[in-house]
């Protein structure tokens, strides 16, 4: 499931980068986080793949959520992230990084009808691209996560990841 999400995100990034010259307009700053504050798309969090949304509270602070599936049931993540000074500026957009924290809830239903619930707390370090010509954001992140719950998988997991492709309104 994570492999499919990663391939989807990489394909979307490749298509978006190839589309930049074709959509050439006047060069300017990205509208994401300034005039375009609300974005929706596909993405995932700690153990969630599905719909993703992000709302900028200020130009550099945002809340984001992912709601979807985790392989055996439904799940949701809610995060707070801060973006820092861009790492790279180009007429096509800018590369940014950020950090934050999030929480998640995951419900698993197995064949015998047994239902289990798990919860997580994650740190977030993200790397993303805001396009100048159109209000799109592509983000990938690393999520060291502490998980606890009914399944007995409690512990710290350092290999968690997430990401999203969002269009902003």
Image (cartoon, rainbow, N blue to C red):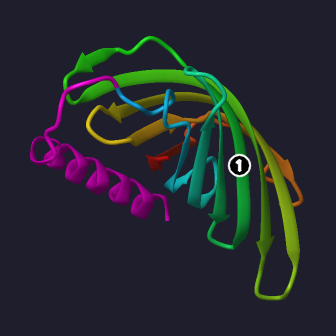
* Residue that appears at 87% across and 53% down: 149
Location of residue 105 in the rendering, given as x and y in whole percent from the top left corner: 80, 54
Q: What residue would you read off at disc 1?
A: 77
* Furthest-left residue in this view: 21
> Looking at the rendering, which quadrant does residue 38 occupy?
top right
Q: Is residue 23 left or right of residue 84?
A: left
Q: Residue at horizontal 39%, vertical 54%?
A: 6
Specify whether residue 27 is painted magenta.
yes
Q: Is residue 168 visible?
A: yes
- Say which of 144 and 13 sits in front: 13
- Residue occupying image coordinates x 53% and y 45%: 162
Work out whether 48 lies above or below 156: below
Give the magenta-colored segment's residue range: 1-29
Nearer to us in this view, 101 or 80: 80
x and y percentages locating residue 120 in the rendered image: 78, 44
Residue 51 in picture, x, y percent from top left: 58, 60
Q: Is residue 113 magenta?
A: no
Residue at left 41%, top 40%? 137
SS assignment for the magenta stretch, majority: helix
């Amino acid at each position: 499931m994570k492999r499919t999400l990663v391939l989807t995100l990489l394909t979307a990034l490749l298509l978006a980068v190839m589309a930049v010259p074709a959509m050439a307009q006047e060069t300017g700053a990205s509208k994401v986080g300034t005039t375009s504050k609300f974005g929706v798309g596909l993405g995932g969090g700690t153990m969630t793949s599905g719909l993703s949304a992000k709302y900028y509270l200020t130009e550099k602070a945002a809340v984001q959520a992912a709601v979807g599936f985790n392989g055996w049931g439904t799940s949701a993540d809610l995060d707070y992230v801060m973006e820092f000074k861009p790492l790279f500026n180009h007429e096509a957009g800018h590369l940014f990084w950020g950090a934050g924290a999030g929480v998640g809830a995951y419900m698993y239903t197995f064949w015998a009808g047994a239902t289990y619930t798990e919860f997580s707390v994650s740190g977030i370090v993200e790397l993303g691209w805001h396009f100048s010509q159109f209000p799109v954001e592509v983000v990938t992140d690393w999520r060291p996560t502490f998980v606890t719950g009914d399944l007995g998988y409690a512990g710290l997991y350092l290999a968690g990841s997430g990401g999203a492709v969002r269009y902003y309104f």
